[in-house]
Image (tube, helix red, strand yellow):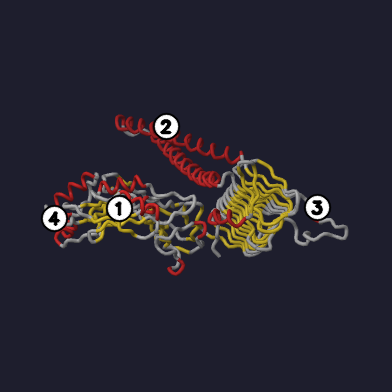
Amino acid sequence: MPKADLYKISITDGKVLLRIPQQLIGAETANIDDIQAELHLMGVDYIPEKLQEIYERTSGEFDFLTDFKTTSFTLQIQLSKGEEKAYLNIIPPMEEDDPLTLEMIIRELKEKNILQGIKNKTIEKMIAEKIYYEPLIVASGKETVQGRDGFPELLFLPEKLRPAPGTKVNLREVPVLQKVQEGQELIRIETATMGEDGYTITGKLISSTPGKQYRIRPGRNTRYNPEGTHIIATKSGVVCINNDNISVEKLKVIEKVDASTGHVRFDGIVSIRGNVSDRCSVEAVRIDIGGSVGKARLRSIGEIRVSQGLKGTVVQCGSTLLANNMTDTQASVGDHAMIDEFVVNSKIYCGSTLEILSANGYVSGGVLQAGNLIRLPNVGLPGTDEPNEDGEFPEKELPQTILDVGISLKNRKQFNELEKLAQESLHFLQDDLEQISTILEELQKIGWDETKINTLTELESKANKNVSNAFSNLRKREVQDEINVLNKNTNGGVVFITGKIPAGTAINVRRSRYNVLSRTTDKAYSFGDNGIQAAPTKELLKLYQGHFLKLPV
């Protein structure tokens, strides 16, 4: 407990007053030796028996101890907790022998190791106006100025839809597919600031924290302006965001995909107004489907959105998958999976989070695996939470549901492989540049040579390809690195189930297994000192709520 909470010495109108609060049983008490030491430093003469009487009485009020009869000024100097400020309290003597001077006070400050930010004018005012018994700030350090994070201004959005300047923006939650024209400014990037260091009144450095740069890069058909402050469209089209880059893509609109259209493969965004029939496939940068999908294949390097259901579909999605429902579906998702209503007998593998959005939604059967977080309303089919005539729960006859969180060995291997591939591309690029430099030197000496010019063209093409491969792999690795960091913060991941959980449900966290033995509700499963722990979802969900994606309408 701070000394000021245990006792207080005050000098008012030439009287020394002592206050000792009433002490609670078992609480820390004032030390009479500390009181005597402070009185000695102040030059106070007192009767020890009087001090003992006040000490034992502990009235909680200021009690008179003695008259203050010094002939010199007493300078009480107190530093703030972080040594950012120094306070001076001037206590005049009863009979003044020598006048108080600026030099005397500065000397006293330096003896307390106060070297920075001394306010001479304040001290002179206290002396001239005889400001006594009123502590004032006479020295201040320099406060740190923390760095400001960078942020994007989303110029491609209508002004009323743009986040306010300085707002933290998750690009995956930004409405896209906005039409833009060649040369249009898409994003203005406000760079982060470094911040300014401060110092204490005793000369100690207080380091500032630099702001974080906002990471967004130009993708296909976009570029930086010469100043590097804006990302600009190099072609007309619609805006598409994948992970941390923004591109402008061509848009192809199709009424439906069936035997009449055949397989659809498009280097851009495919928007299908109707359904995708069995035995068809769709490949694109991004896929939007207004209807349902049967036993078909969907493959996209970016997002896939399906307004209705997936039934028997095989999905490969590089970014985020959003669908109304899933039955007998296999989906591999790079980042987030968001299902509106239900998932039945399906296998979903996603890099970061998986959730069912409807409060009455559910999963039944199959395997749901996420790198970090799973959030579900219920496990088991509706109508299986009441016993039948024999007193048995129908859920016992249903297939087991397996919920798994944690970075899989496959993903860890992929993460290491991406780093290796990026390094290889950079090494190959270095070799290409050395060969290009050699050929250029030879051409300067011997002049035009058709064979060497052709070789130079081939090397240039190889170098461009290696640059592209290196950047692509490094960007994929950065996305995986973010998933790894969150996985570390969650200690392997968490499974949230806010509703019913039937017996037999299997929960895997960090490759440790937990079998639900009896029906229960509202549980969060996470990894603790003794393996997987089950606790109510409310408190734990608060910690990780922000990591679940909120896609725009």
- Is there a contact, CB below 8 Å, between mark 1 and mark 2? no
Q: How far apart in space, not on screen, are marks 1 and 3 (Cα)?
A: 65 Å
Which residue position holds label 3? Answer: 396
Identify which residue, 440 or 114, lies in the foreground.
114
Mark 2, residue position = 431
Q: Residues within 10 Å of mark 3 (few under 14, many from 20)?
A: few
Mark 3 and mark 2 in contact? Answer it, CB < 8 Å: no
Q: Earlier in the sequence, mark 1 or mark 3?
A: 1
Gap in angstroms between the C-alphas marked 1 and 4: 38 Å
Q: Please tell me how crowded label 1 is: few (under 14), some (14-19), or many (20+) other residues with Cα within 10 Å.
A: some
- Residue 1 percent across, percent down from the top left: 41, 50
Viewer-side label of 4, 3: 4
Q: Report which quarter residue 381 is drawn in.
A: bottom right
> How many C-alpha atoms fall within 10 Å of the one at disc 4: few (<14), some, or many (≥20)?
few
Q: Nearer the viewer, residue 101 or 301?
A: 101
The residue most toward the bottom is 160
Q: Which mark is residue 281?
A: none
Q: Are marks 2 and 4 in contact (CB under 8 Å)?
A: no
What is the x, y in percent for residue 296? 69, 54
Q: Amino acid at mark 3?
A: Lys
Give the mark nearer the N terminus: 2 vs 4: 4
Q: Tag 2's secondary structure?
A: helix
